[in-house]
Image (tube, grey):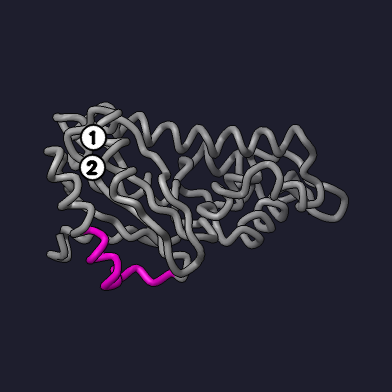
């Protein structure tokens, strides 16, 4: 069935204009970007295929143009448009965090970390470097590991904090397994980094454990 053959209130474009973007499903929003389908599959079905293949929008955010080549019907133009829109979403959140103190918008911090780390297939250790007003200077992915562990070198974290003239940091790493509870190793690493950074007067404000569906604050759990 073509999109034009759907009832008017079920067509993504008309639905968005009448009820707002929030009323649309992920597949419907993607259908608007795709605009057209292929023989036997309309744009809405292709949007749903993207959602299914990549485990939701979070997975799609990290798919990249290369992975999108495997979806039949996505030519270079459509792949480029999707990658561009997803990158704009990351940049919009980054700009928001640079304009105001990080913890003035705690949900934005979680959203940003999930966009950056939540769907990675391997473990990533990242640091948000903050200025004296707790505004974001940069997020840097410093270490990459396997599905179960990452080797993190405190000296390199200290060097980057000094180079960026950071006053404080927020640590973050993902658990590809989906288990959001910090492990004992996570707690030990946090204390090691806290001690190392404290020597150069850089505070560790929090450490987030990120999965596809959530970002858990170790400070909120009393583990900092």
Q: Is residue 137 above or below residue 122?
A: above
Instruction: Report if the CB atoms under discs 1 and 2 are less than 8 Å apart.
Output: yes
Q: Position of residue 1 (x, y in %)?
A: 79, 54
Asked if residue 12 shows in the view, the reply is yes
Location of residue 207 by image quarter: bottom left
Q: Position of residue 62 (x, y in %)?
A: 56, 48
Viewport quadrant of the C terminus: bottom left
Location of residue 80 by image quarter: top right
Asked if residue 108 shows in the view, the reply is no
Label 1 belongs to which residue? 130
Q: Is residue 83 magenta?
A: no
Q: Which residues are magenta?
A: 178-190
Q: Position of residue 140 (x, y in %)?
A: 39, 40
Residue closest to the eye, 186 or 44: 186
Residues packed near mark 1 inside 10 Å, few (<14), some (14 to 19) or many (20 plus): many
Label 2 belongs to which residue? 169
Say whether residue 35 is left or right of residue 213: right
Residue closest to the eye, 186 or 101: 186
Say whether residue 133 is left or right of residue 115: left
Say whether residue 188 is left or right of residue 59: left
Q: Is residue 75 above or below residue 190?
A: above
Residue sticking out furthest to the front: 155
Q: Position of residue 184 (x, y in %)?
A: 26, 73
Q: Is residue 180 above or below residue 89?
A: below
Q: Which type of secondary structure does the marked residue at label 1 adopt?
A: strand
């Amino acid at each position: 069935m073509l999109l034009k053959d759907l009832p008017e209130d079920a067509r993504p474009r008309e639905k968005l204009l009448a009820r707002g973007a929030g009323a649309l499903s992920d597949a419907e929003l993607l259908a608007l970007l795709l605009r057209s389908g292929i023989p036997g599959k309309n744009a809405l079905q292709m949007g749903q295929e993207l959602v299914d293949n990549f485990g939701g929008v979070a997975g799609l955010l990290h798919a990249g143009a290369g992975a999108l080549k495997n979806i039949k019907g996505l030519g270079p133009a459509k792949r480029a448009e999707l990658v561009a829109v997803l990158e704009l979403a990351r940049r919009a959140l980054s700009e928001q965090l640079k304009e105001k103190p990080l913890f003035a918008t705690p949900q934005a911090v979680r959203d940003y970390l999930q966009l950056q780390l939540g769907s990675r297939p391997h473990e990533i250790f990242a640091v948000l470097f903050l200025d004296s007003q707790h505004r974001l200077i940069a997020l840097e992915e410093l270490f990459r590991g396997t599905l179960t562990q990452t080797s993190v070198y405190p000296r390199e974290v200290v060097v980057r904090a000094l180079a960026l003239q950071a006053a404080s940091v927020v640590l973050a790493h993902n658990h590809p397994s989906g288990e959001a509870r910090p492990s004992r190793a996570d707690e030990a690493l946090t204390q090691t980094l806290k001690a190392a950074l404290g020597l150069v007067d850089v505070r560790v404000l929090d450490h987030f454990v990120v999965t596809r569906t959530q970002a858990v604050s170790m400070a909120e759990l009393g583990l900092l």
